[in-house]
């Protein structure tokens, strides 16, 4: 499989408008700017030295110019998840230079060189060097994830082979390219195809403004954005324009996925994976029974004995295999997920899996989305953050929170002991997902302050 991946083309095809938006930028201009920035890098970093460069840039054209040039030179690219001052200052302690739209007072910016001398070498796709991502997962502490360029290239070429995206496609995104999902799907994949790329969109209404120009649109989005969109889908009028709609970064609720499938007349492609693992599998939920996930080519999982914990084998990871924090079983070569391993806790000496309680909550006729957390004090207790559906909100308005609590608890008591049920409940319009599609524990805990 890897031999096939490495044989695939590594040069950007010609395209009139590679980057679209306020300013159309051509492939030729992109290649020229990569060469110019690469020369700036050479002016400031001594030959033979591998530097660590902190890169943040919201403009997709400017980001990819710097990202590709640094990759061509084999430097280590550090991608902060955001440009908040505290994040930048923390990561700046372990880098040599920075680039992009951030400012670090005690370091030299690679953008500072005023040279305009162009490199003589022809454009080539990076193969050496590393990229370091930072992800918080469900906690507040950033974790460094290192990926070699060879792994990123493997995944981009597999995505290109699986989804058959075309050079005439236009990639529209609501997620940041500073994270691995956005980097792969809305930056490197279209760049390698020579497809058109728009800057990041924040609201559906802004996407509406460009849809008349996009007949082969590919939307790269998140569960949080798509869940909101399903409530008032201003993009459904352009459903014939969309070739693919992708969702990743967290779970997209089945109810939202099925609603969007009806609105767009096509299933949302949900991608299962993480920064550490890369893509593992994908599925399209067209009917409620479509629960199984298709593995990406070259990727497989086996269930460990006893607890069904998954072991991953993949060309997108450095090690020969990886033990995951997810449970699942493989059925006829496809994956059925069974929840998280690391969400099993002890309450009053009872072992409780938070994912199992959440799944049962979702079976209640009033519940659309739910998240459980553990609150610490004199003793540990469970707390539930719940997003109700239309029927649930009507019941909340008519009968009040106490009646809702009682109804959900009665439903859960058919499967769990009373001592293991949530003791605190909060009902919200939307769960507080961050830009990575995660639910940070600190944000959830604030709801109970």
Image (cartoon, rainbow, N blue to C red):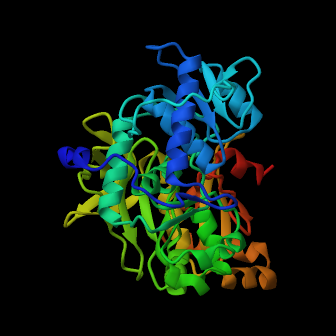
Q: Is residue 154 above or below residue 293?
A: above
Taking the image as shown, residue 390 lies to the left or right of residue 438, namely right
Nearest the viewer among 109 and 223 is 109
Residue 81 is at least partly visible in this image:
yes
Residue sitting at x 54%, y 26%: 39
Rendering coords of residue 387 (x, y %): 67, 69
98, 448: nearer the viewer: 98
Please indicate whether residue 312 sits to the left or right of residue 174 in the image. left
x, y percentage for residue 447? 76, 54
Q: Position of residue 362 (x, y in %)?
A: 54, 72
Taking depth in this image into account, of 394 and 351 the one nearest to the observer is 394
Q: State the residue at coordinates (71%, 74%).
A: 205
Q: Quick check: 347 left or right of 200?
A: left
Residue 189 figure quarter: bottom left
Count how many numbered circles sit on residues in the image.
Answer: 0
Q: Is residue 413 visible?
A: no
Q: Nearer the viewer, residue 236 or 426?
A: 236
Q: Is residue 95 above or below residue 293?
A: above
Which residue is pictured at 48% across the width and 74% down the height?
Answer: 216
| Residue 322 on image: x %, y % | 32, 39
**In this rendering, would 55 be left or right of 271?**
right
């Amino acid at each position: 499989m890897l031999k096939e991946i490495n044989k695939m083309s590594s040069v950007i095809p010609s395209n009139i408008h590679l980057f679209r938006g306020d300013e159309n930028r051509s492939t030729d201009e992109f290649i020229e700017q990569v060469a110019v920035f690469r020369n700036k890098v050479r002016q400031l970093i001594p030959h033979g030295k591998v530097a660590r460069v902190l890169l943040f840039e919201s403009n997709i054209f400017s980001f990819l110019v710097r990202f590709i040039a640094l990759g061509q030179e084999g430097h280590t690219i550090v991608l902060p998840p955001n440009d908040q001052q505290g994040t930048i200052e923390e990561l700046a302690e372990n880098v040599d230079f920075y680039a992009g739209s951030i400012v670090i007072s005690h370091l030299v910016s690679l953008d500072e060189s005023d040279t305009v001398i162009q490199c003589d070498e022809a454009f080539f796709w990076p193969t050496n060097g590393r990229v370091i991502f930072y992800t918080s997962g469900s906690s507040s502490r950033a974790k460094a994830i290192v990926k070699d360029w060879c792994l990123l290239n493997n995944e981009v070429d597999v995505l290109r082979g699986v989804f058959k995206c075309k050079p005439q496609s236009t990639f529209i995104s609501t997620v940041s390219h500073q994270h691995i999902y956005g980097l792969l799907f809305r930056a490197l994949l279209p760049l390698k195809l020579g497809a058109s790329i728009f800057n990041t969109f924040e609201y559906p209404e802004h996407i509406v403004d460009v849809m008349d120009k996009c007949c082969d649109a590919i939307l790269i989005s998140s569960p949080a954005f798509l869940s909101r969109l399903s409530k008032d889908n201003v993009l459904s009028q352009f459903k014939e324009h969309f070739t693919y709609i992708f969702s990743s970064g967290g779970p997209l609720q089945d109810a939202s996925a099925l609603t969007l499938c009806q609105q767009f007349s096509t299933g949302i492609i949900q991608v299962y994976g993480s920064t550490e693992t890369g893509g593992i599998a994908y599925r399209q939920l067209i009917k409620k029974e479509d629960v199984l996930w298709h593995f990406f080519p070259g990727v497989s999982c086996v269930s460990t004995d006893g607890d069904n914990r998954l072991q991953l084998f993949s060309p997108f990871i450095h090690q020969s295999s990886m033990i995951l924090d997810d449970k699942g079983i493989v059925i006829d070569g496809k994956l059925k997920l069974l929840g998280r391993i690391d969400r099993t806790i002890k309450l009053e000496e009872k072992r409780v899996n938070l994912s199992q309680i959440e799944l049962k909550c979702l079976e209640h006729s009033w519940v659309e989305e739910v998240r459980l957390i553990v609150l610490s004090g004199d003793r540990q207790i469970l707390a539930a953050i719940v997003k109700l559906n239309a029927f649930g909100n009507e019941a909340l308005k008519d009968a009040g929170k106490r009646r809702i609590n009682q109804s959900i608890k009665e439903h859960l008591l058919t499967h769990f002991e009373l001592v293991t049920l949530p003791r605190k409940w909060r009902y919200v319009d939307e769960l507080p997902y961050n830009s990575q599609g995660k639910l940070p524990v600190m944000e959830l805990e604030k709801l109970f302050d």
